Image: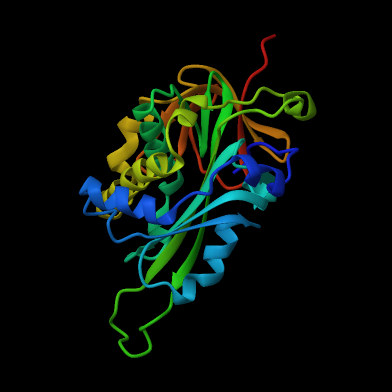
Amino acid sequence: MRAMNSSKTSAQSSLTFPATSAARIAELIARSGNEHAKHILVEAVAETGSTNADLMRRVPQLTQPQLRVADCQTAGRGRAGRPWRTSPESALTFSLAWRFAQPLSALMGLPLAVGVSVAEALKVFGVPVELKWPNDVLRGGAKLAGILIETAADERGHAADQHAKKGCWAVIGIGINLAAPDGLVQELGRAIGAAPELGGQSRETVLAVFMSALADTLVLFEEQGFAAFVERWHAFHSYAGKPVRILDNGRSVHEGSAVGVDAMGRFLMDTAQGRVAVLAGDLSLRLQEPV
């Protein structure tokens, strides 16, 4: 996840911004009647280094889904380990730890399914967004939200029962830009997407909606894989039909026209050599510059 670097300190932020209430989030989830979300444990902190790192350390002790929300994140990481710092005014940051009964190899396409969930939840609040493969949420072509998923095998219980199904944990980190601090666009040299519409709602309400959407998504993903989300992903596809290139460490490896994604979450594009399917890995997708 890479969003905005805030120039305000957490101490300054806490003077003007109310702390997120874990109890209120849990109450709203319970009132929603979402059977998939009601088992999520909720915790909220004023400040932490990284909600993803916090939950990854605790995976060996987790027994049910866990949401961790931080009003201020000081050592967050995005794709390729990029730093990401936030304040309550600038971004909404949270991570959800979720156990799958399947092995890690079954999670191909999960970041894209989560992207669909985030896009659909934002649509509830009237925020128009698009999806950029593999895991960016855009608004007007600028990055609005990012997704970072880290995984770990669940080794517990298998020594006693060799026939038990080996599962895994996914820690899903999501960051959504609420506003762009003064001067940040100039500092980064690119446009920043923001969702000020979310500011009209309590953070607890927004997070409860996201948890309901994510819980439904993760249950469906475990049952049917990314194939169940392909058409929903295409409904938000930002680059459909546009000239694009795939970069590997800055070097162009494919150029062509963006088609979409397949049931495995691979990016499809038509090139001079024919259609190619690209796995994410450390590759980057970019629009081609006009000649």
Q: Is residue 143 left or right of residue 35?
A: right
Q: Position of residue 249 (x, y in %)?
A: 72, 41
Vertical position of residue 25 compared to residue 254: above or below: below
Q: Residue furthest right?
A: 187
Residue at x 65%, y 44% (from the top left corner): 15
Residue at x 36%, y 32% (from the top left corner): 120
Q: Is residue 158 left or right of residue 93?
A: left
Q: Residue furthest top?
A: 291
Nearer to the camera, 265 or 132: 132
Using the rendered image of the protein, determine whether residue 221 is visible from the camera's viewpoint.
Answer: no
Quarter of the view holding residue 42? bottom left
What is the quadrant of the C terminus in the image?
A: top right
What is the quadrant of the N terminus in the image?
A: top right
Nearer to the camera, 290 or 58: 58
Using the rendered image of the protein, determine whether residue 249 is visible from the camera's viewpoint.
Answer: yes
How many numbered marks appear? 0
Vertical position of residue 194 compared to residue 150: above or below: above
